[in-house]
Amino acid sequence: MSKKFISRDDAVEMIDCLGDEFTVIKNPDYIFPAYEICPMAGKVHSVKGTIPAFVMDMDGTTTTTELLCLHSLEYMIRLFTGRMSGDEWAGLDHALDYPHIIGNSTTKHVEYLVEKYGNSFRKDDIKNSFIHAALWTLMNGRDEKRKEEVRNNVKILKLSPMLQDPVFKRMEMNPTSFEITPEILKNFTDNYGSDFSCPTFDSLVRAGIDVYYKRYHEILETIKKGEGRRVALDIFHEAEKHLIESMPGVLTFLSIINGWIAGEEIVYFMPQLLKDYKTRTGIEFPCDSVHDVQASLKQLAGNYRKNPAKKALVTSSIFYEADIVMKELMAMLQFQVMNIDMPKLLKEFLLEKFSDYNNVYDAFITASDSSEMRLKPHRDLYSTALYKLHVPKEQFNRVAGFEDSESGTIAIRTAGIGLCVALPFAQTKKHDLSAACYVCEGGLPEVLLRHKLFTV
C-alpha cells in the first residue's frame, strides 16, 4: 500500500491482513500513543532437522542476575520510604509485584513501583537518596550515557547549582580520592536541596531510575573487583553464594548448539544435565528413559557438529552491565567444565571457548543498541538480533527464542519468531506466559531431555 495517511477503516483492513493474534503493548507514561497494537507470529511447535538460529534472554534465562535487579528495585523503595528494615516493610511481594518488575524496561518497572508505593514516599528521603545517587554516578559511573541522563535529571529536579560546587568539581576530577561520607552528603543536601522539586509522576520515576541504577552498578563494580561474596553475605546472607551464576543446563545447551562436542561426547555431560534437571524441577529424571534420551542427544550433538546454529544473546540491560555479567558467566562455565570428568583435550578446548563470550555468541544485543522506550515487550531487541545474525524473514519460522518473562515472550513473538519457549524461574512463575508455545519449568534441562530441542 502506497498511502502514508489512511482512514480508520483502511487501518482495520491492513491489520486484519497481518495475522490472527495480536498483543497490546503499553508504552512508558511519557510516550505517545499510550499503547500499540502489534501482530504476533503464528506459533511453531517443532522444526525439521536442526534449528538454524537461537535467540535467548540473559537475566533469568541464561544467568541469575535478575535477583540483583529485584534487590536494587526494592532497595530504591526502601530509600524513598525510609523503611530500611524487614520489620518496617517486608519487601516486594513475589506474587503481586514481581510480574510487573521483571522483563520490561527499567522505566516500566519503576513506573509500576512509583504508582503502587508512591503514597509512602517521603520528600526528604527522595531528595537525600537522589542526591547521593547522582553524586555517586557522576563520580564513579562507567557508562557515559547514564551520566548524561543523571546530569539531565539533576537539572530537571532543580539541583543544577550542585554541579558547580567546588567540592563536587574536585570529587569529579579525582573520584578515587573521595568517599561520599554522611557529612559530605549532608553538606550537599543542606546547601542545594531547598530547591529540590519532584512533584510529578514523571519526576519521581526519573529519580527512582537513577537510585536503582546507582545501587545495581555499585554491586556490579564490587563483583568486577572480585568482592562479590562479601556483597552476597550483606544482601542475601549467604557467604558462599555467587551473585552471578549460569542457569541450569546452559553449559550443555551451548556446547551442543555450537557444535563443540561430538555425538559420543554427550556422555560426559549427562550426569550434570540430570542433576540440573533435578535442581530445576525438584524431581529425578526417570531412570528408564535416560538411555533413550542419551541416544537422542548424541544424534542431536552430531547434527549440530555438522551444522552449528547461529546464536544471539538479548538483554534489556545496558552494555556496561551486560559485559560484567557475561564475563562472570564465562568464568562460572569454565569452573563447571573443570569439574566435569572428560578427556583433557576436550576440556582444554571448552575452556578456551568459554574464555570469552564473543566465542560463544554470534551477536550480543543490549539496551545500548536501542532506546529505553523500545525495550521489551517491544520487538526491537529481537529484531536487531535476527538482523545481526543475518536470518532472512522467510527463515524466522525456524528460529527458536528462549525467555523467562511475559514481556520477553511477547517480544519474541512480535519479532516474527513462532517457536517461543518460556523458561520461568521462581520469580516469574506468576507471569502470563501464554504467548509461548512451550512453558518449560524445568528450564534448559527440560528442553534437552524432554523436548530434544524441539526438532523432529
Image: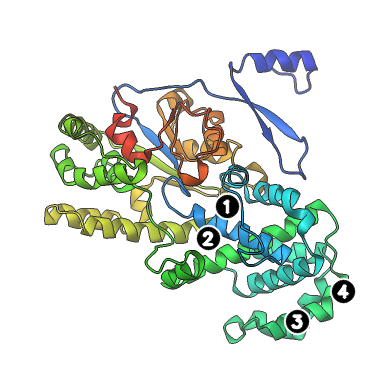
Q: Position of residue 73 (x, y in %)?
A: 62, 57
**Residue marked by disc 3:** 186
Q: Which residue is mark 4?
A: 194
Q: Disc 1 marks which residue?
A: 368
At mark 3, the secondary structure is helix
- Check disc 3: other Cα within 10 Å, few if <14, some if 14-19, many if 20+: some
Query: Residue at image x 76%, y 62%?
Result: 153
Q: Quadrant of the N terminus?
A: top right
Percent position (x, y) of residue 304?
Answer: 25, 35
The amino acid at mark 2 is Tyr
Q: Looking at numbered disc 1 in the image, what kind of residue is underneath it?
A: Ser
Residue in the picture at 18% in, 41% down: 266
Judge from the rendering whether residue 89 lies leftward or rightward of residue 246; answer left or right.
right
Badge nearest the viewer, 2 or 4: 4
Which of the two discs, 1 and 3, sits closer to the camera?
3
Q: Which residue is mark 2?
A: 320
Instruction: Using the image, determine if residue 320 lies above or below residue 376.
Output: below
Q: How many marks?
A: 4
Q: Nearer the viewer, mark 1 or mark 4?
A: 4
Spatial CA distance of label 3 from label 4 is 12 Å
**Rendering coords of residue 233 (x, y %):** 45, 69
Q: Which structural element holds mark 2?
A: helix
Tell me which numbered mark, 3 or 4, is placed earlier along the sequence. 3
- Between the C-alphas of marks 2 and 4, the distance is 34 Å
First in sequence: mark 1 vs mark 2: 2
Q: Quadrant of the C terminus?
A: top left
Residues at circles 1 and 2 in contact by the CB criterion of under 8 Å: yes
The mark that comes first in sequence, 2 or 4, is 4
Tag 4: amino acid = Ser
CB within 8 Å, label 1 to label 3: no
